[in-house]
Every structure is written in C-alpha cells, then in structure tokens.
C-alpha cells in the first residue's frame, strides 16, 4: 500500500491508505469488516503510527511527496474507495471544514443517520453513492427496492433535521472537472 501511494499517485494512495487505516488490510483484500464502521479512533491512531514507521523506513526518493500527501489526507473514515476519492477532491479544491462519518441528531438528541460528509457551517450533508449497495444479490443488474426506499426515508429524516443533502456518484469523484462542477452546484466553490 505504501508503494501504491508513492508510485501511483495521490488518489490511489489515499484509497489504499484509507483501507488500511479503516480495516488494517490492503485495498482489494477480501471484505472482512468486523464491528461497526467507522473504526474506533484508537485503532486508526495505532494503524497510523504503524504506517508512519513504514513510511519513515522507506527513506527519501521519487514519489515521497505523493506518499506523504496521501498519508496526510487519508483518514481511515472512508467506507469506500469513492469516499476516499471525494476526500482527495475536497483537499485538491481547497474545501475546508469537511467532517467524515458524522452522526446527525434530531432536536431531541436522537441519532438519525450517520453521513459520509458534513459541512456543519452550511448544514450540508454530502453522500457518495455507489451502485453496489442498491444491487440485488440475485441479479446485480436489478435494484433492491427495499434498500432504495430505506435510503430515501433516511434522507428525508436528515432533511427534517434542517440539513440539505447533496449526492456524489462514482463518476463525480473520479473526474476532477466533474467533481468541481458538482461542488459548484452545491455552492462550495
């Protein structure tokens, strides 16, 4: 994963390092998520310390600046590669104050939903949608209506708490120009 971050660029590096920080495994490894997401801050901190030691042992050389930037931007809070890429986009475009994996609470203090990204100052929730969570296990070309309806109800509960919800797709996060246009539509640029 350190080699990916050093040799393949910041986007690939953040995806790889986020996977390790979040789950303690390499990107592309079998999905062995245990427990709740996001991981405990202590687990992320311990893995970050391990990564720092590995990075230090690699010495200086080509790609080190990319590696250090990917290490700085990776949080371990991205639940998917698309969320990691969104994080890169926010940094690249200078969008500040973005929080990841934040719980939205109603006026009584009850948790309504955990969101991918939050800009609290704008009361803006940004969700990154992949198609995987909506696909039927029986036929990946079919959408699961129950999951789609649950997501729509969840979004409505977030809106009822006074937040605007914006959505990014995989196509948005892999293309910096498209990502910029999406953020402009949200009023962030």
Image (spheres, rainbow, N blue to C red):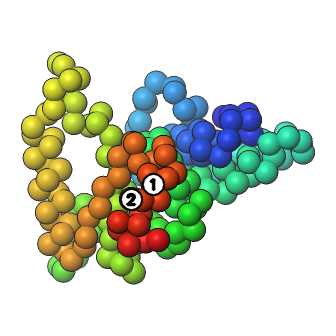
Crowdedness near tag 2: few (<14), some (14–19) or many (≥20) residues, C-alpha within 10 Å: some
Label 2: element kind: helix
Mark 1 touches mark 2? (CB < 8 Å): yes
Q: Where is residue 175 in the image (x, y as percent from the top left)?
A: 49, 46
Q: Residue 151 at what x, y percent from top left?
A: 17, 50
Of residues 4 and 185, the one nearer the viewer is: 185
Q: Is residue 114 left or right of residue 149?
A: right
Looking at the rendered image, the quarter that the N terminus falls into is top right
Quick one: 186 or 35, which is closer to the camera? 186
Quick check: 178 left or right of 41? left
Residue 38 appears anywhere in the view:
yes
Residue at 41% from the left image edge and 66% from the top image edge: 184
Whole-number angstrom distance, CA of label 1 to CA of label 2: 5 Å
Residue that carries the numbered disc 1 in the rendered image: 179
Image spot of residue 171 (x, y percent): 40, 42
Residue 45 horizontal side relative to residue 127, left or right:
right
Q: What residue is shown with label 2?
A: 182
Measuring 70% from the left and 54% from the top, which residue is drawn there? 69
Farthest residue, direction right: 60
Q: Is residue 47 above or below residue 109?
A: above
Q: In this view, does 104 lie to the left or right of 56?
A: left
Query: Which of the two residues, 42 or 125, is positioned nearer the viewer here?
Result: 125
Which structural element holds mark 1?
helix
Residue at image position (67%, 51%) is: 71
Residue 77 in sight in this render: no
Tell me the residue at 65%/46% (across/down).
Answer: 10
Viewer-proximal residue, 158 or 34?
158
**Residue 2 got which mark?**
none
Above or below residue 124? Residue 20 is above
């Amino acid at each position: 994963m350190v080699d990916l971050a050093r040799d393949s660029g910041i986007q690939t590096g953040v995806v790889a390092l986020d996977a390790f920080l979040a789950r303690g495994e390499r990107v592309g490894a079998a999905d062995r998520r245990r427990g709740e997401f996001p991981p405990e801050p202590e687990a992320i901190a311990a893995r970050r310390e391990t990564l720092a030691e590995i990075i230090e042992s690699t010495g200086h050389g080509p790609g080190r600046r990319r590696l250090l930037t990917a290490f700085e931007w990776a949080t371990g809070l991205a639940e998917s590669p698309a969320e990691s890429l969104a994080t890169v986009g926010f940094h690249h475009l200078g969008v500040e104050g973005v929080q990841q994996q934040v719980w939205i609470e109603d006026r009584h203090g009850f948790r309504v939903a955990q969101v991918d990204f939050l800009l609290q100052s704008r009361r803006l929730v940004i969700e990154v949608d992949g198609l995987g969570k909506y696909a039927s296990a029986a036929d990946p070309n079919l959408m699961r209506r129950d999951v789609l309806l649950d997501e729509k109800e969840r979004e409505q509960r977030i809106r009822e708490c006074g937040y605007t919800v914006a959505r990014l797709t995989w196509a948005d996060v892999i293309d910096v120009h498209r990502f910029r246009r999406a953020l402009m539509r949200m009023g962030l640029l």
